[in-house]
Image (cartoon, rainbow, N blue to C red):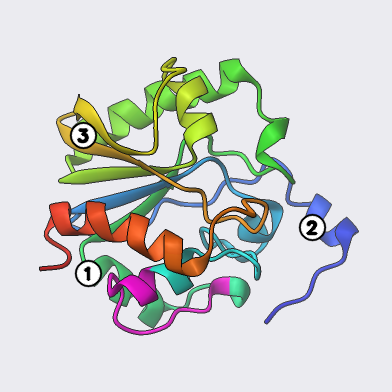
Amino acid sequence: MAAFTRAELDAFRDTEVPDLYGADLRLLFVGINPGLWTAAVQTHFAHPTNRFYPALYAAGIITRPIDPAAGMDAEDRDHFTGRGLGLTNVVRRATARADELSAAELRAGGAALHRFVSERRPTVVAIAGITAYRTAFKVPAAKVGRQPGTFGGSVLWVVPNPSGLNASATTASLAAAYREPALEAGILV
């Protein structure tokens, strides 16, 4: 695992992380925005305390563990996209914490995400983070789970954020929450 000083991580503020998806995009997971560790290693959800990949593995969405803290290698990326999975963010720029984003920035990112989804047409989109979803899409009463209607032609779910800052979520509860959209996307049977 890589190790960074605070100063080294701060140098990655505003850095973007490329989207990850393949030709058979069935389930697109959407983070709020990249954290500094994610930007440093150019791998989504990469902070060592983030439970995203352990939850995907526990749910059977990925079939082998991925430890992204040092950055996904080509084999990890091929496994991930080969499962019909993809990754992007509502806001593209990296910050130390998601609360550094303005409501206007989240709404602009939400509009860009809608265009991305309309072009790529994944079966299911799963946005990880109810608070950011409510702000980005102006739905203050939204609840975690399957959302009504479609989003850019795709089924839309809002799932819990896997960040270590989300103390109410466990790897097991995240696995259960991520399993539902994966079933609907045909990733799991």
Where is residue 168 drawn, in percent x and y? Answer: 59, 53
Question: Which residue is at a point 65% across and 38% down the rendered structure image?
Answer: 98
Q: Which residue is mark 2?
A: 9
Q: Which residue is mark 1?
A: 83
Q: Earlier in the sequence, mark 1 or mark 2?
A: 2
Task: Please tell me whether residue 113 is drawn above or below residue 21 in the rendered image.
Answer: above
Q: Quadrant of residue 122?
A: top left
Q: Is residue 115 left or right of residue 139?
A: left
The CA span between labels 3 and 1 is 20 Å
Q: Is residue 137 left or right of residue 132?
A: left
Where is residue 164 drawn, in percent x and y? Answer: 65, 59
Question: Which residue is at a point 14% across and 52% down the rendered structure image?
Answer: 184
**Number of the label disc, if any, that sits on residue 149:** none
Give the amino acid type for the residue marked by disc 3 in the picture.
Glu
For the residues carrying marks 3 and 1, which lies nearer the camera in this image?
1
Which region shows up in magenta? 56-68
Give the amino acid type for the residue marked by disc 1 in the picture.
Arg
Asked if the stretch drawn in magenta spans residue 67, the answer is: yes
Where is residue 141 drawn, in percent x and y? Answer: 43, 19
Question: Which residue is at a point 29% across and 27% down the rendered structure image?
Answer: 115
Q: Secondary structure at mark 1?
A: loop
